[in-house]
Amino acid sequence: MILGLAIFFTTLSIIVSYRVIVGPTITDRLIGADTIGIFMSLVMLMIALHFDLFLLVDIVLAYAILLFVDMLIYAKYFEHGELYR
C-alpha cells in the first residue's frame, strides 16, 4: 500500500514536470517545482516508514522546511523585485 502510494506520487511529479518545463509564466514554473518537491518529500517519507528508517523522517522534515523558506524568498523577490527592502 505504501509503496503503491509512493509510485503514485512519483507519477504525479512526472506529470507536474510538464508545467515546470512548459509553464507560460515563471510563477507557474515555481509552483510546479514546489509541488514536485512536496511530492518527492512525501515519497521519501513513505519509503522511510516502509523500511523503518527514522533518520530519513528527520531529513524529510528539514527538506520540507527548506521548501517553505524557498517559496517565501521567491514570493518576496517577485513582489518587490529585490530581496532586501
Image (cartoon, grey):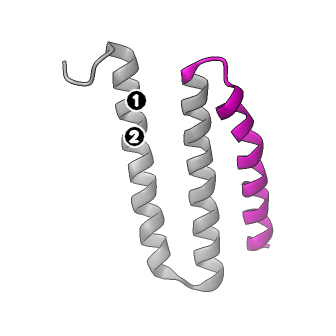
Q: Are marks 2 and 1 in contact (CB under 8 Å)?
A: yes
Q: Which residue is mark 2?
A: 70
Q: Residue visible at 35% across and 32% down?
A: 73
User: How many other residues sit within 10 Å of disc 1, few (<14), some (14-19) or many (≥20)?
Assistant: some
Q: Which residue is mark 1?
A: 74
Residue at disc 1, secondary structure = helix
Task: Say above or below: 82 vs 55.
Answer: above
Q: Amino acid at mark 1?
A: Tyr
Q: Residues in magenta?
A: 1-26
Quadrant in the picture for the N terminus: bottom right
User: How many other residues sit within 10 Å of disc 2, few (<14), some (14-19) or many (≥20)?
Assistant: few
> Residue pushed farthest left?
85
Q: CA distance from mark 2 to mark 1?
A: 6 Å
Q: Is residue 41 magenta?
A: no
- The answer to whether residue 16 is left or right of residue 1 is left
| Residue 10 location (% of width, % of height) | 73, 56
Q: Is residue 4 magenta?
A: yes
Q: Which mark is residue 3?
A: none
Q: Residue visible at 66% across and 18% down?
A: 24
> In terms of image quadrants, where is residue 79?
top left
| Residue 84 location (% of width, % of height) | 20, 23
